[in-house]
Amino acid sequence: MPSAFLPAQGSWYPVRSVVIPSIQAGLRQGAKSLRSEGVPGYWPDFLRRPWLASLAMTAVLIGACPATVLLADELDYGLERHRLARIDLTGNETFTDDQLKAVLRIEEPDWKRPLAIPKYEPYLIDTQLRLIESYYQRRGFQQVAVALDSIAVVADKGDVIYISVVEGRRTWIEKVEFIGRGTLTESELREQVRLIEGEPAPMDLNDLGADIYAMRSLYWDRAFLDVHIASAMTVTSDAAADRLAVTIVYTIEPGPAYTIGAIDIFGNDQTRLDLITRELQVREGGLFAWGDVENSRRRLLETSLFRDVVMVPTDRDSTRGTAGLRVLVIERKPAFYEVGLGIGSRERIRLSAAWGHNNLWGTGRRLYLRGKLFWNVEPILGRRRSFSEGEINYRVEALYVNPHLRGSDFRLDLSSFIKRQTRGESALILNTYAVAIGTGRRYGLRWDHRIGIQFKENQPELHPLAPPDLRERYEQADITDTRTNSLIYSVLHDRRDDPFQPQGGSMASTEFQLAADVLGGDNSFFKWWGAWHKYSRSPLGGVLAYRVRLGVAVPYGSSAAKGPDGVPYDDRFFAGGASSVRGYRENILGPQIQDQKELDELEFGSGVPLADNPARGGNWQLIANVEWRFPLPLLSRWNLAGVLFFDSGNVWAEAKDIQLKAFRLRSYPGPPGDPNSTKLWDYRYSVGPGVRLDTPFGPFRLDVGFPLKRAAYFSLDVRIEDPKVVYHFSLGYPF
């Protein structure tokens, strides 16, 4: 290793040794350095014993080094942790300092981590240099050289590490050839490889491993289980372009296409054999396509009957081109129960219980029973309540699933629920009874389609703490007992890497609902909503989560004459609260059930928020969220994580209420006549931090929302404003 300038007592001294991780290795290396400087090379035989040699070399080094620079000091410097002030890079023309520093395992001071004090071990610097070299080599710089120039001490700040880079000429892929493809076309193979013409060439053949595995997987999916792929690289010089060129050749020996011989299933002590075989996507005598084998494994796991499923080929006969398939299932208990206790900002105390069975009568059919009990003390039209003034809310539901209706790939879903829910934003208590029957089918591993019919009855009642004059307004808004019978079709496309704690991927979902009086209900309307979720790794660490949700509900037929009220209250869209737009109270945004007499007396327009008028929901909805989820320094060991979020959204009664100026970034809680004051139709924004505690039941979350567009609410005798800060706590991710 070249000489390094290592600090000692505030000065720089050249030392011809390398800082190493162990004292014994350091002494041996130090001895070699001294020998290169002229220390006699004759060593008595007794010093060849390791422990005696170490002792002797210690004495030699102490006597040979100047008093101001002892090897012991160097070793101490190399082994102890040092504070890092800065990393200085020179010679890097192709990649920026930030790109290269992101590769390192040591980090500079960062304002985003005010409590973190960056430190490093000097003996690991050589490892950091190799990381930079590897970064360059994987991007075509096969002649790159990275060196440590010096380390300087800056008083009260720490060490400055100076690293130089000599990039050299870059190597590019000039040609990729495939020899012996068998039945696969070249275009099919090219779709699998990422290192193609025009891309930087890798350092060695090991970097081709990902492409080889992708091509091998393609052959496995075509039943070529014995495929062998060899690779070779030839480097030539292109003097005119001052670069190196590479030709990559893949030599492929596909071997025979296998068919499946016997399929042997083991481990099914409680599960009937036909329940397993109907989930298999492969059959005896068919092609041994490995993709179908993997799909069969996932389908078996999705039945919830097994903890694990292992599938391996057996008894390969390359002459006949046949192989058996061994399926080992590890069963789980078919029946389960759950009990949970939780709290929330809307539901202060929550008790839940569930029982389920995944293999009724040994047929693979499932039955789930769930119940949730809440003690609700949310404010009624902004009026806070004490704990003793709350009331019981509940939801009880049952679900029956036949995964293979009459032996087909379509399932049968039967569900029902009873719900009693307090809606503080409207001073209503909703009693809901519903029954649904439907069918669905999964396509591959990502798509799920479902269609069904739902029969629902809503019985709203005025909350005992609601103002007495609200009843007349509810009657005018037609908030009465209603029956809504509708057809529902939904589609889910889930590409998340983890459905519970996604770190990457996306999810898209949509639902169409057609309610009609010909089905025996009281309402006729069309409702659609769609949502898109995206998850990706943040360059700052953690995960970035995005969501966009759109919705529209339009009455028709006999309900069209009611205008926006043709859509029942319970089927409208709402915004505001812990799972939509944080920083605002639950479901408070959007239109209100307004008292026209009060509006006339106040001489206000319909867009002015009134203090004593409840939220009514809207027929048009737009919500967008961005959330950065990151581990908390020093606290992640206790399963604590942090969040920074930006939420936005609102709902509107009709499309004509959506104005361009509603999306202005600033408005304030001013008088009604001020055009810059916040109106009901204003699109709202909020920001804030949050804390997540990971629990077996999902993340417990506390969010603090700061509304950026607050509104003032007026009446004949009072004026109030949106709170400057709203706290939300609940269980589970908001999206």
Image (cartoon, rainbow, N blue to C red):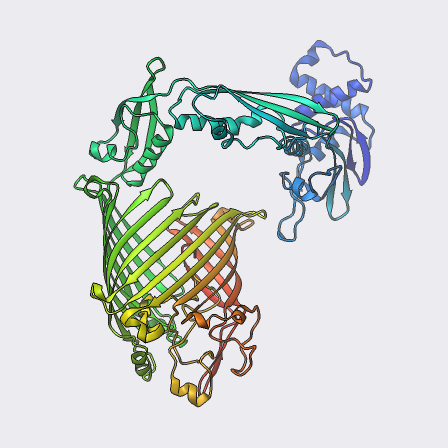
| Vertical side of 625 occupied by 47: above or below | above
Q: Quadrant of residue 105?
A: top right
User: Is residue 732 shown left or right of residue 154?
Assistant: left
| Vertical side of 78 occupied by 52: above or below | above
* Residue 537 x %, y %: 53, 46
Q: Nearer the viewer, residue 204 or 376?
A: 204
Q: Residue at x 43, y 71 (%)?
A: 590
User: Is residue 173 shown left or right of residue 322?
Assistant: right
Q: Nearer the viewer, residue 56 or 307?
A: 307
> In which quadrant will I find the N terminus?
top right
Q: Residue at x 40, y 81 (%)?
A: 612
Q: Quadrant of residue 729?
A: bottom left
User: Is residue 542 shown left or right of residue 567?
Assistant: right
- Extreme residue in the bottom direction: 601
Q: Nearer the viewer, residue 18 or 166?
A: 166
* Residue 213 x %, y %: 48, 27
User: Is residue 344 shown left or right of residue 212?
Assistant: left
Q: Residue at x 70, y 38 (%)?
A: 94
